[in-house]
Image (spheres, rainbow, N blue to C red):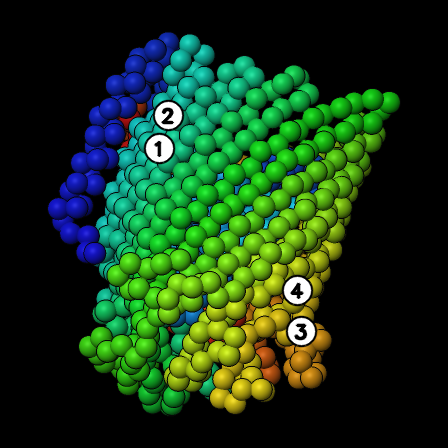
């Protein structure tokens, strides 16, 4: 379904209507202010609100909201200003700031995959306000969120098992926007080649003591991005109402998202040679490739203080999603000439998901020892309806891509016009924990258990009849310790397990341009359990924070291999183990007035172990760089305080391309530059002007070799110019 100019007008009218409805309330709030700020104070305030920042505090699921110094985990939360300043098109562009994460794509799809500590986190398993299954899958528009929280490492106790089967190396949680202050902000933006955007964000607190809050924000973006002829559009609206008074706190959030990408550049499947990189803005897709998603999602949460030391809470979320995707994959045949085979795949899909959690948190003190006890339950339900149409292969070229008409169908499954259920998943759990504090809570010992049950049912594409499934349960414990020997320093350690639904075997996979049947296609593997050990430390020096973590994670390996019992077919299963050992150093803050930094370095030694028949034993895991480094710097110019210069360096080390380690990607470095300037309009309205250039040198490079199966490369993005202007009323 094409989004035309009439729909763009309707969406803009909706945003303006929201502003018209809420503007009088914001104006009243301004009129009620008895002491208006001076021009200098307004500029200082605007500059402060624009500062890109990271917090080490955030939500730890079953353990609640915690400060950085009280948790035995590595947590970072990227703030709303970062999203506004950098104009990210997707969630992956936000996470480019993290020195422990790299982003790639799933094979043959536009959906983003985040590699954390060397393991994948699929977009299906991104949390929203602490609940799984509520975030739109594949692609997420960042404009709807106030912060992006990252927890490195396994988190099966904290958040429960990820229902999509990933998240062993870390998790990401998106927090909805809420009214923190009275505000009306309008933003217009541009991204090269011809991508234009507009956004409105309105917030208001009201009531006798400001106990009520409402925030409505929306944005519209459309046009070609810097990759040749690749079109993106995004239309989103979000609204949050919250209440905070006395013992009760409650929040209701609802969101709408509609995204479209057409002619999107895919990953490249290769053979035994790494090809030269095409031009930075080259596009080897086809005009008929597209992904279009429409999602309605939201949450309701409430907390009630039974007493000064006891609280009950509950949260519920739901999502209805619809997507239509037509891929245009490419498999290289001749690295010298670029000759290749193209493949197409049409996959309509709908999702209906719900998720809920509730619990009791009690704090006790006695005999110099404190306890924080948490008990609760959680559950999520997911129904996936989809169908597929595998298209005929065609000839194409990596370096001189011809336009090819959409091929005819080769094989199909399910009902393409009205998909029926292909899988149902229920993940339920009960959990309990106790955080024991000694020496005035300078020593914290955490112990907890979560009993989880994963029930899946799969259905045949042919007629929708039940074809398989399982009902498995597991206990995932956590043990952690935090020692705070002095103010601003905390040392920690943890042992925690990860648990994820086993992945489902595809019916067909593409090997060197040829569709190959999978002997156990449709089978869902048993739940995957991993074990993590981690020790680390954190330092808070006022405005500057630093952290160091050493970790080890062991996880069963799932991949496709030739089926020895069925000649010509492949099979999918857990074959061997991957062990990742690494060191993470992260830092953020303002080491000196006017200079802010976000950065860090990650070293990861990811090895294959207990492989089938000893083949590839001890080799590097595919697509896991040995070294990552980031540095994101903001400098407020001392001679012109309204001007801030920004810069970012992203470094990614060498990566194994195949399990045999006969191919390796070179390391790469990307430089980004930018600036922003704050001026006053009418004497009291701050106007922020921003200009950024990503990949200043227009470097062309293979960014990632990470793949669940096959040998695939993802090309890095070209030089991209971004500009925006925001004004607050």
Whole-percent x, y for residue 211 in the image = 45, 17
Which structural element holds mark 3? strand
Q: Is residue 166 visible?
A: no
Residue, disc 3: 576
- Residue 290 vertical position relative to residue 3 in the rendered view, above or below: below
Which structural element holds mark 1? strand
Whole-percent x, y for residue 491 in the image = 75, 44
Residue, disc 4: 555
Residue, disc 1: 239
Mark pair 2, 4: CA separation: 44 Å
- Residue 448 vertical position relative to residue 248 in the rendered view, above or below: below
Which structural element holds mark 4? strand
Whether label 2 touches label 1, CB < 8 Å: yes
Q: Report which quarter residue 574 is drawn in.
A: bottom right
Whether label 2 touches label 3, CB < 8 Å: no
Whole-percent x, y for residue 617 in the image = 69, 80
Mark pair 2, 1: CA separation: 7 Å
Please tell me whether mark 2 or mark 4 is closer to you in this view. Answer: 4
Q: Earlier in the sequence, mark 2 or mark 3?
A: 2
Mark pair 3, 4: CA separation: 9 Å
Please tell me whether mark 3 or mark 1 is closer to you in this view. Answer: 3
Q: Residue furthest right?
A: 367
Which structural element holds mark 2? strand
| Category of crowding for the residue at label 2, using alpha-carbon neighbours closer than 10 angstroms: few (below 14), some (14–19), many (at least 20) | many
- In the picture, the quarter occupied by the C terminus is top left
| Category of crowding for the residue at label 1, using alpha-carbon neighbours closer than 10 angstroms: few (below 14), some (14–19), many (at least 20) | many
Q: Earlier in the sequence, mark 2 or mark 1?
A: 2
Residue, disc 2: 214
Mark pair 1, 4: CA separation: 39 Å
Q: Earlier in the sequence, mark 3 or mark 4?
A: 4
Residue 180 located left or right of residue 400: right
Residue lying at 23% horizontally and 69% vertically, measured from the top left: 288
């Amino acid at each position: 379904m094409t989004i035309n100019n009439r729909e763009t007008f309707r969406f803009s009218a909706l945003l303006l209507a929201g502003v018209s409805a809420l503007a009088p309330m914001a104006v009243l709030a301004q009129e009620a202010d008895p002491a208006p700020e001076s021009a200098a104070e307004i500029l200082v305030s605007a500059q402060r609100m624009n500062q890109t920042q990271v917090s080490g505090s955030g939500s730890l699921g079953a353990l609640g909201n915690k400060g950085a110094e009280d948790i035995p985990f590595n947590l970072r939360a990227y703030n709303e200003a970062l999203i506004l300043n950098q104009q990210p098109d997707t969630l992956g562009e936000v996470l480019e700031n993290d020195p422990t994460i790299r982003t790639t794509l799933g094979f043959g799809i536009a959906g983003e995959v985040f590699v954390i500590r060397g393991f994948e986190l699929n977009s299906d398993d991104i949390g929203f306000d602490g609940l799984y299954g509520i975030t739109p899958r594949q692609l997420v528009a960042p404009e709807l969120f106030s912060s992006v929280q990252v927890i490195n490492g396994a988190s099966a106790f904290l958040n429960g098992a990820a229902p999509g089967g990933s998240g062993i190396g870390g998790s990401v949680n998106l927090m909805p926007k809420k009214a923190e202050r009275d505000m009306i902000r309008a933003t217009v933006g541009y991204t090269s080649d011809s991508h234009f955007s507009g956004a409105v964000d309105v917030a208001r607190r009201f009531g006798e003591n400001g106990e009520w809050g409402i925030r409505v924000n929306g944005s519209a973006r459309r046009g070609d991005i810097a990759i040749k002829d690749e079109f993106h559009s995004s239309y989103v609206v979000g609204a949050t109402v919250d209440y905070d008074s006395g013992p009760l706190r409650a929040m209701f959030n609802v969101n709408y998202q509609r995204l479209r990408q057409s002619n999107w550049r895919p990953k490249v499947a290769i053979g035994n040679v790494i090809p030269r990189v095409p031009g930075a803005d080259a596009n080897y897709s086809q005009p008929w490739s597209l992904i279009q998603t429409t999602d309605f999602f939201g949450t309701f949460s409430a907390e009630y203080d039974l007493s000064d030391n006891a609280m009950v809470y509950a949260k519920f979320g739901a999502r209805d999603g619809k997507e239509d995707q037509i891929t245009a994959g490419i498999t290289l045949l001749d690295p010298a000439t670029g000759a290749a085979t193209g493949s197409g795949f049409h996959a309509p899909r709908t999702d209906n998901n719900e998720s809920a959690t509730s619990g009791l948190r009690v704090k006790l003190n006695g005999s110099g020892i404190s306890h924080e006890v948490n008990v609760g339950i959680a559950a999520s339900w997911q129904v996936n309806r989809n169908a597929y149409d595998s298209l005929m292969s065609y000839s194409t070229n990596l370096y001189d891509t011809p336009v090819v008409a959409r091929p005819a169908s080769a094989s199909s499954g399910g009902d393409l016009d009205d998909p029926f259920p292909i899988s149902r998943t229920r993940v339920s759990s009960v959990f309990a924990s106790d955080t024991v504090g000694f020496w005035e809570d300078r020593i914290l010992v955490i112990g907890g258990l979560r009993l989880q049950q994963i029930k899946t049912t799969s259905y045949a594409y042919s007629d929708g009849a039940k074809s398989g499934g399982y009902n498995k349960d597991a206990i995932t414990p956590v043990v952690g310790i935090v020692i705070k020997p002095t103010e601003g320093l905390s040392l920690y350690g943890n042992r925690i397990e990860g648990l994820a639904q086993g992945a489902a075997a595809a019916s067909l996979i593409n090997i060197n341009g040829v569709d190959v049947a999978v002997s156990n296609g449709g089978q869902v593997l048993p739940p995957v359990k991993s074990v993590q050990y981690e020790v680390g430390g954190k330092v808070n020096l006022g405005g500057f924070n630093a952290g160091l973590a050493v970790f080890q994670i062991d996880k069963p390996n799932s991949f496709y291999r030739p089926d020895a019992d069925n000649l010509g077919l492949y099979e999918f299963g857990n074959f061997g183990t991957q062990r990742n050992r690494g060191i993470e150093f992260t830092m953020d803050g303002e080491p000196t007035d006017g200079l802010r930094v976000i950065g860090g370095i990650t070293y990861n030694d990811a090895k294959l172990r207990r492989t089938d028949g000893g083949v590839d034993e001890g080799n590097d895991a595919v697509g896991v760089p040995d070294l990552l480094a980031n540095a994101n710097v903001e400098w407020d110019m001392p001679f012109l305080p309204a001007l801030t210069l920004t810069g970012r360096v992203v470094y990614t080390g060498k990566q194994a391309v195949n399990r045999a380690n006969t191919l390796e990607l070179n390391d790469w470095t990307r430089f980004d530059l930018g600036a922003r300037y704050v001026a006053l309009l009418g004497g009291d309205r701050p106007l922020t002007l921003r200009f950024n250039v990503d990949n200043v040198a227009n470097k062309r490079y293979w960014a990632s070799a990470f793949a669940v199966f096959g040998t695939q490369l993802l090309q890095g993005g070209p030089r991209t110019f971004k500009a925006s202007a925001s004004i607050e009323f």
